Image (cartoon, rainbow, N blue to C red):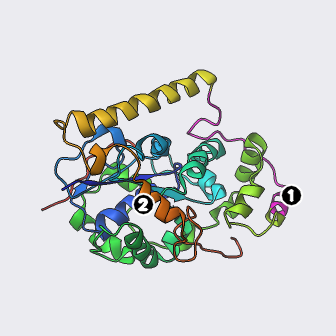
Amino acid sequence: MSTERIHIVGPPRSGTTLMQALFATGFDIDGVTAHEEGLWRRRPRGERILLTKCPGDEVLAPLLLPLDRHLWFVFMLRDPRDVVVSEHGQEPGKYWSNLRVWREALQFHAKMKHHPRFVVVRYEDVVSRPDAIQEELVRRMPFLKPAVPFSRYHEYLEDHVSTSEQFNRAMRGVRPVTPDSIAAWRDHLPRVKAQLALHGGIAAELVEMGYERDNSWQTQLDNVPHDQAESLVPDQLPSRRRVQHVIRRWMRTIRYVYRRYIQAGGHTDGHNGGRGTDRGTVDAYQSTTWRGVPPGDAISYLRTEDGTSAAQRYRRP
């Protein structure tokens, strides 16, 4: 039996850690790796389902999804204004990420959102109606078997997964899922204004993704000073570093294929030796809509007026 691989990705501070905790607790999954572990680091070892997560690994999706028909990416989409004002428990009082990183992640979202095994989930929907999102995920990935309602994950997390200091810092402790963090950017207007000045406007993207109906929200930034505090993730990336990232992407792709198929002793997953896209699945998906949502859009919409180092985690017997 082939292992189904689920890899949770997205920009930093988009909810990837929360989603990993929900998957590990809410579904019957027998393989849960480190708090943050790159897709290419670990090959299946006989698990029915192997769950990993690593923000930024969405860059691997265009290269690997056509090669591995048992690989699934879950991409976390979040209002970029909330992304750039989110803090990490590792560095309290400091902004973690920025619009540069968010935009780079969204480039791969745009490329892959029509692929049936690239599942887009809105953070706002997860924290507002977690159990409905759990049901939607089962519809998208029928091999998933619910174990605990997402809304009650915090009651069972430690029974299923060994939490770590890094996990607790990223999550700021294990607590119920609530929508309290939606539109937190309203309390950080100077930060939002500074990010827009540095990286350019996002008004069109917000309307396109349904976070705003129009551009009127920008009036809240009038007469607001700029918060010039640097992000912990660099706001600017030199050309040399960008080239290094491209090379690293290809090296990780090669390593994933090697460990998945060659190091495993020549065994492959699926038909056609694991090579090539499952064209029939793609065509069937792209020719229909899914519960009224155009192919490739987030698995559900929430429309309102407002619109990490590796640490071992394991499933206990």
From the viewer's perspective, is the residue at label 2 or at label 1 nearer? 2
Left or right: where does residue 266 sit relative to residue 41?
left
Q: CA distance from mark 2 to mark 1?
A: 49 Å
Q: Earlier in the sequence, mark 2 or mark 1?
A: 1
Q: Secondary structure at mark 1?
A: loop
Residue 43 x/y as whole percent: 25, 42
Dominant secondary-structure state across the stretch colored magenta: loop
- 18 or 93: which is nearer to us? 18
Q: Residue at x 52, y 72 (%)?
A: 290
Q: Are marks 2 and 1 in contact (CB under 8 Å)?
A: no
Q: Amino acid at mark 2?
A: Thr
For label 2, the crowd category at 10 Å Cα-Cα, with few meaning under 14, some 14 to 19 and many 20 or more, is few
Q: Which residue is mark 2?
A: 281
Left or right: where does residue 240 sit relative to residue 141?
right
Residue 158 x/y as whole percent: 25, 65
Q: Secondary structure at mark 2?
A: helix
- Disc assigned to residue 222: 1
Q: Residue at x 73, y 67 (%)?
A: 212
Left or right: where does residue 236 sit relative to residue 254?
right
Q: How many marks?
A: 2
Residue 147 image-quadrant placement: bottom left
Q: Is residue 221 above or below residue 178?
A: above
Q: Residue at x 53, y 49 (%)?
A: 11
Question: Which region shows up in magenta?
Answer: 218-237
Residue 287 image-quadrant placement: bottom right
Q: Quadrant of the N terminus?
A: bottom left
Tell me, yes or no, if residue 277 can be seen here. Answer: yes
Q: Amino acid at mark 1?
A: Asp
Query: Magenta includes 230?
Result: yes
Q: Residue furthest top?
A: 240
